[in-house]
Image: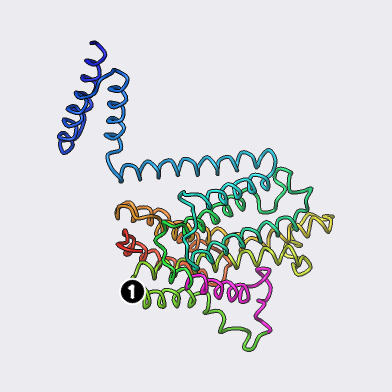
Amino acid sequence: MRGPGLVDRYLAVVERLLPAARRDWGRAMRAELATLDGAAERWRFALGCTRAAMLPGPTGRAAGRSLALVGAGALVLGGEIVLAGVIGEFTPLLLALALLAWLGRRPSYFGPVRPDRAARIARSCGYCLAAACLVALVVAEGLPGLFRPGSLRSGTLFALVLTMVVAAFLAMTARTTRLGGTAMISGIGAGLVAGAAGFVVLPFERIGTPLAHGLPWQGTGLAALPFAAPAVAALVTGLRARRSDQAVMAALCAAALGALLIALAGLSAIVFLPERVPDIVGPVMIPGATAAQRQLENSIEASDPYFGLLVFGALLAALLWAMARPPARAGATIALVLLLGVPPIVLAGTARDFPGTTGIATAAVAVLIGAMVTARPARRA
């Protein structure tokens, strides 16, 4: 008789801890407990009631899943950092990308892909971007150099950024995404235009002449495309989808993809065309430095703006993820947009010796304002 009495008293304590709006539910559970026989069955029922009380509805379950996702993501990124110091950055990066690709095919936050052409194209772009980065790393270091700690020129930061970019592409193309097909296609198309135009009008080696220098009028008309393309994507999406949040996400998609493509093109060109890299650091090098040392330092200096754009693109992709994530409370979504929107503005505003810094910072502020205004759960994707 002691066992059943303990179960009754335990469930009574759980009922008293419930909020007032849930007390009727607690009394109903105690009444149902009275109809059960057997101590084991009664205890299982009581523990089930406890679990239901701790996660009372879809909101609680969603919060638990979000917390678990954040913890798992922090564990993966932390593991990449730790392993990078032991076996180099390349192997942990491959393992992380393989894990993401596996999750992208299973029912999870990253998959499966939404069954429409726009989502499949967007996800393919993410995979192609990752594959191009891996090819550039292999060419830059050679196979033996990929497995030495600190051997990659990109370092651990590059591996972490690439991991987060691929995760963002998967999350934004999963079945639960709020990003509509029109916004995806418009954003990808505008991003390709912005990336190509931005790489052509930027000085390839930071101090040299732009690639567009040989074009008619020195390619001055192309300078507006990196800024105009996201605006056009937002306008087209807004007119077709009739939703302001989709327009903002299209602009974010175009800006993030454009920045990532410029960074990838610049870093790849430095790797594949080392003869194009001028002697940037010659005057400050120690006398007697070898040609290989000078070449390495010149490549590092020439890569700086492109690494900045790589991080900038990843930050914009994170902001896009915050808006495209599954519907949640409006307050939580706005807080997340604010949290992820400040870093790209700070990065753009503090950049030095980079053409268009003021324009990029202004555009980032405008996009963040639009994201805050439209960051609310969608009624229908």
Q: Is residue 96 magenta?
A: no
**Position above or below: 276 against 290:** below
Q: Residue 210, image x and y in percent?
A: 65, 76
Q: Which quarter of the image is occupied by the N terminus? A: top left
| Residue at image coords 36%, 73% | 241
| Residue at image coords 65%, 80% | 212
Image quadrant in which you'd find residue 54? top left
**Position above or below: 129 against 147:** below
**Closer to the camera in the image, 155 or 326:** 326
The span picked out in magenta is 186-214
**Position above or below: 25 against 184:** above
Q: Is residue 189 magenta?
A: yes
291 left or right, relative to 25: right
**Secondary structure type for disc 1:** loop
Q: Which quarter of the image is occupied by the C terminus? A: bottom left
The amino acid pointed to by label 1 is: Arg
38 left or right, relative to 236: left
Q: Residue 222, image x and y in percent?
A: 57, 81
Magenta span: predominant SS is: helix
**Closer to the camera in the image, 172 or 323:** 172
Evaluate whether residue 213 shows in this view: yes
Evaluate whether residue 359 shows in this view: no
Badge 1 crowding class, 10 Å Cα cut-off, few under 14, some 14 to 19, many 20 or more, is: few
Image quadrant in which you'd find residue 231? bottom left
**Closer to the camera in the image, 200 or 181:** 181
Instruction: Check disc 1 and report the residue beneath it.
Output: 242
